[in-house]
Image (cartoon, rainbow, N blue to C red):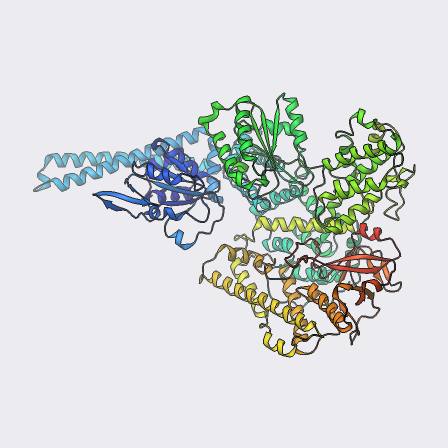
Amino acid sequence: NTLGNPVKIRQWNIDGLPTDNFSIDNGIIVFNARRWPLMIDPQGQANKWIRNMEKQNNLQVIKLSDANYLRTLENFIPYGTPVLLENVNEELDPSLESLLNKQIFKVNGVNSIRLGDTTVEYSENFRFYITTKLRNPHYLPEISVKVTLLNFMITPEGLQDQLLGIVVSQERPDLEDQRNLLIIESADNKKHLKEIEDKILSIMSSSSGNILEDETAIQTLKDSKNMSNEISKKQAIAEETEANINSVRQSYSPIAYSSQILFFCIADLANIEPVYQYSLLWFINLFITSINQSEKGKDVDKRLFNLNEHFTYLLYKNVCRSLLEKDKLLFSFLLTSRIMLGQNKIDMNEWFFLLTGTSTDTSPMNIPDNPASDWLSNKNWEAINRFSTISSIYKDFPNDFIQHINQWKDVYDSLNSDSEIFPGMFKDIKGISRLCALRCIRPDKLVNAIQLFVTEIMTDKFIKPPVFDIQSCYNDSTPFIPLVFILSPGSDPMGSVMRAAEILKTTVEPISLGQGQGIKAEKLIIKAKEKGTWIVLQNCHLAPSWMSTLEKICEELADHDNHDEVNPGFRLWCTTYPSEVFPISVLQNGVKMTNEPPKGIRANLLSSYRMDPIANETFYNSCIKGYEFRRLLYGLCFFHALIQERRLYGPLGWNIPYEFNESDLRISVQQLVLFLNENSQIPYKALNYTAGECNYGGRVTDDKDRRTLLCILKRFYISDFLQIDYDILSSSSNNNTNAYVCPLDGSYNDYIDYIDKLPLVTTPELFGLHENATLTKDQNDTNLLLNSMLDTEQGSTNSSSENTVNKEDVILSIAIDIYNKLPNNYNIEYCQIKYPVKWEESMNTVLCQELIRFNHLLTLMRTSLINIQKGIKGLVVMSNDLEIFSNSLYINRIPILWKSRSYPSLKSLSGYILDQSMRLSFFNDWLMNKPPSTFWISGFFFTQAFLTGALQNYARRYIIPIDDIVFDFKMLPDDNYTTGPDNGIYSYGLFLEGCRWDKELNQLAESYPKVLFTPAPIIHWMPYRKIDVPIYSHYKCPVYKTSDRRGVLATTGHSSNFVCYIYLPSDLSEDHWVERGVAMLTQLDD
């Protein structure tokens, strides 16, 4: 009201400035600040406004990536032509410093400025605008003081104002027209009043003598008074009319409020995958579409209800087609929870507990003994006690649990724990509270429970994503916006694009991007724009340096001035894995979609049989050995389905989720025909080698995964597979069922019919896994869903909740708590004196090296915890690293900053601090007293160095080359030993996953139901000469530091995760345990 001009503001709104007060304030600051504006503009609103507003002044648009952007500035500053510098990052070119600081000087009486090495004239009419698309940039103080930083990122209140204006303009255009007329009339009235004031002041200042004797002045004052009274009456009427209009407008505010919640839902998806980008313009256009398509109604409340229902589902459908399968339920849950949060139907403390399993209360807890230790884990009992602290309603949950312990056990043992009726205080409880209770008892069932929760609140259509339809995606596209396929392992959208092109009678030219392909792609795009054909840019994530060119090409396509040059039939298709290098503007404006490979053994088999060349009748009947080919082909397709579906079981299936696809199967099928036609006997060895080592094995980089792949392939490429009643399931399990017996020989259609009758749900036994693998898979799915939800939250809280503790206070208390728990650094000098370097004792060196590593970690932790406390108190600048660090503390995750100096760990932050405390105590006891008789192998930073030290001691004692020595292993019967062995070492602390150790039989045995991990016995690591190692039936079990099993090779040649192999006695074949995914872990994730 003070600095703004209503007429000018209205023109800004016409030019694209949002109508909310926040944006209008920003616009006023742009033109009144002394420094050039740098606008944080992820939705492109400021960019659009500047472009439209300055278009008549010949606005020049430049980027720092342009080769000649300085030349553009040199050419247009002298003429006062406005310049927009867009898409800057967190650093600006030093060449712009003189322009930002407005370092103007006179040369021959003319204002001048220096740009780089050039001095140019400076026009007073010149205006300079800067925009960035970064959502949350961290500009250093030296940049902030040179510009006026303005946040044009849309706010909830600002978006609500915009959407309210849109819905009223669509529903009641008469009100919007009347409101616009009032703005013009009000501006005219104020203009006249200003003119009157100026005229009076002019008369009074120019009048000489007594003003009462000046008849002209008296008459003018009289006329001015009459006109002023008349204008005041008009203004009063106008203000009353405006109040009435605003009252009617506010009746539409519920839909504006609920719709702005939906926009911030999809905006936060970018925190999960960088390709989940949606522009505000796209959202507003979809909103207008919904207004036009939804059911009309005279009653405003009924109309708004219809519009809300229609728009929410329309948004769900449109966003779902661009989400990977793993994130579709997440989006449904995100929509549901945000809508309920907006209606204040969720307690924020319960919500925080559901996502993190902990509470914002950091005070230590006295947890009583677990009353159901025979079936309930200590972690779950701790969760029950922790949940009781977040709300007075559930403070008696532990006692209530003990009172109804048998009923809770029934819930725990049920196959459908998510849908069971809960006992005690939770009998009639629904919603988030029920989910929290289930998280305490059976967290692996949360995904199913969340589906039921979404169905209950939003109906089941929000858990049934629309099927992929490339035709509808094409219909939503134009020649001027690209279509983007978001890839996932095993997906290949080229087939769908080719079929769509055949239907529409157009041609497709694919090009796989990579080194040197960018220039070829540009030429193909130019030709295709003229001819009206399709271009497919494959694997865009592999050409990061060319992405800026792609962004420029897409901007030129979107430019209205170039539309006449583009053939209406032209389409630009792109494929990319989720990657940060793909241009955000292309993602926001393009039509995004996903087309993932079929899920399940049956769907996978059908897909394989319907692909080329298997579906080709001539090829299918081309083999001389018809029966053998058809049987082995079925086995090969089954193998292809198995190795893809094993990915669902996480590290139990594969250490690394490989991208096996149709091309692997296609070449293997062609080789199968070739080998069968050219050999009288079936060359199983050659078939296993070409498929297992070359075609599929060529993708496998982990030697343990290669071993698993060959084990699975051996189930199909063997002579027994040709037997009529060969049972695929019984070869990997004791479960005898005829569901997966090989089909009788027949025609192609007979095989298709047989496959179509296979079970929809596959048991883990078919993959060679234990039945507990389903539990592991469900637990992994739960962790992924909750961690992804945390990523969308970014640790934020809802300040409207009365029960919510201030986020900064929580972070501060956590930081102080952890800081106080950290011990002092180890005294390395004392260690070196007490445990000097000795020829006969390598463990002294191992101890000193371990303590040095812990000191580095402790110093880093201490420094970062001090800095975050200062940052929260405002004593130091809250940098991007510190902000990420604070979010990690708040959501109970190990900060990335610590991971750079830490041992590998997948624990929560609280679990990590407890585990670290135990490690420090172990080494402190060793340092202050003596080497332990039994070593805690899990406590070491660099486990391989410890094992090498043990081998070195043996080698030096018996004067044997260390390269000739290896370990053999003996599982010891007792749980404690007061003295160590003469040779080798005793160790404890390992866990078995996928099996258990049978102490009575002294061999591996199958896991108990619902028991995923079991402690391994104390192990005697016995050094032997390689030629003296005893031979016995065993499983070569890999040992990993963490449960994700995958690691990277360090410069020392050691993996960051894999430790070594341990030989475990077994009466079953090694293949059995390989397919089980059996491994040892040094630590669990709890």
Q: In the rendered view, does 652 fall on the left or right side of 351?
A: right
Residue 321 image-quadrant placement = top right
Badge count: 0
Residue at the farthest top position: 505
Residue 939 is at least partly visible in this image: yes
Indicate the position of residue 32 as horizontal and vertical percent values: 32, 44
Residue 380 image-quadrant placement = bottom right
The residue located at (76%, 64%) in the rendering is 371
Q: Quadrant of the C terminus?
A: bottom right
Indicate the position of residue 668 as horizontal and vertical percent values: 77, 36
In this rendering, is residue 426 above or below 123?
A: below
Indicate the position of residue 23 as horizontal and vertical percent values: 41, 42
Q: In the rendered view, does 652 fall on the left or right side of 858?
A: right
* Nearest to the observer: residue 584 or residue 391: 584
Q: Quadrant of the N terminus?
A: top left
Indicate the position of residue 1065 as horizontal and vertical percent values: 85, 60
Residue 293 image-quadrant placement = top right
Residue at the farthest right position: 724
* Nearest to the observer: residue 559 or residue 397: 559
Q: In the rendered view, does 1002 fall on the left or right side of 483?
A: right
Residue 2 is at least partly visible in this image: no
* Nearest to the observer: residue 928 or residue 818: 928
The residue located at (69%, 72%) in the rendering is 843
The residue located at (35%, 39%) in the rendering is 73
